């Protein structure tokens, strides 16, 4: 895997992935125009885990209509201001979702599949939770 990051101006940088996609980073605290590198890391953990949770639930034939993960993180007070804690809360909406299946999907992501979260867990406390919202009367298209 390869990537590059190029300075644009002020504290704004553009990253380019090996697959050719670009993302802007901005570390300007007063007038930022894009997420900071730490915000991107936090969102990366959420994206990685969400992919797992949705995929696992779909394979279990659960009718998932919506999945959102809300992330919170705490940082050290002194430099380097690394994350010390991170929490991922999954809000899963669907038709007749099984509490057991959602719990299993979140657990598998946390303990086995999400490489971002698992890598971070070697340096900080990462916790997970979930809630289920029923979408009765709505059917998922296959």
Image: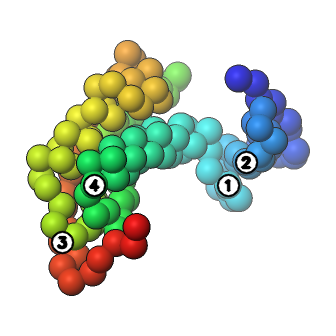
What distance separates the C-alpha of mark 4 from that of mark 3? 16 Å
What distance separates the C-alpha of mark 1 from that of mark 4? 37 Å
Element carrying mark 3: strand
Q: Residue at x 11, y 47 (%)?
A: 100
Give the mark toward the camera: 1 or 4.
Answer: 4
Residue under label 4, please give it.
61
Residue under label 3, please give it.
134
Q: Residue at x 52, y 41 (%)?
A: 44
Along the horizontal axis of the image, is 27 left or right of 19?
A: left
Q: Residue at x 71, y 58 (%)?
A: 33
Quadrant assignment for the C terminus: bottom left
N-terminal of the pair, mark 4 or mark 3, is 4
Towards the viewer: 139 or 91: 139
Residue 34 percent location from the top left of the image: 67, 55
39 vs 93: above or below: above
Along the horizontal axis of the image, is 48 left or right of 13?
A: left
Residue under label 1, please give it.
34
Residue 95 percent location from the top left of the image: 22, 70
What distance separates the C-alpha of mark 2 from that of mark 3? 35 Å
Disc sitting over residue 96 in the figure: none
Residue under label 2, please give it.
23
Give the mark toward the camera: 4 or 2.
Answer: 4
Q: Within 10 Å of the Cα at label 3, are there few (<14), some (14-19), or many (20+) other Cα atoms? A: some
């Amino acid at each position: 895997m390869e990537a590059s990051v190029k300075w644009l101006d002020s504290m704004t940088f553009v990253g380019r992935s090996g697959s050719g996609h670009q993302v802007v980073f901005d570390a300007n605290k007063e007038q930022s125009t894009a997420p900071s590198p730490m915000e991107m890391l936090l969102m990366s953990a959420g994206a990685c885990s969400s992919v797992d949770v949705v995929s696992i639930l779909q394979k279990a034939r659960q009718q998932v209509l919506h999945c959102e993960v809300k992330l919170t993180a705490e940082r050290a007070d002194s430099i380097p201001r690394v994350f010390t804690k991170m929490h991922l809360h999954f809000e899963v909406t669907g038709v007749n979702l099984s509490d057991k299946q959602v719990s299993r999907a979140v657990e598998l992501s946390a303990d086995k599949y999400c490489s971002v979260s698992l890598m971070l867990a070697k340096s900080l406390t990462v916790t997970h939770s979930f809630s289920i919202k029923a979408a009765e009367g709505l059917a998922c298209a296959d």
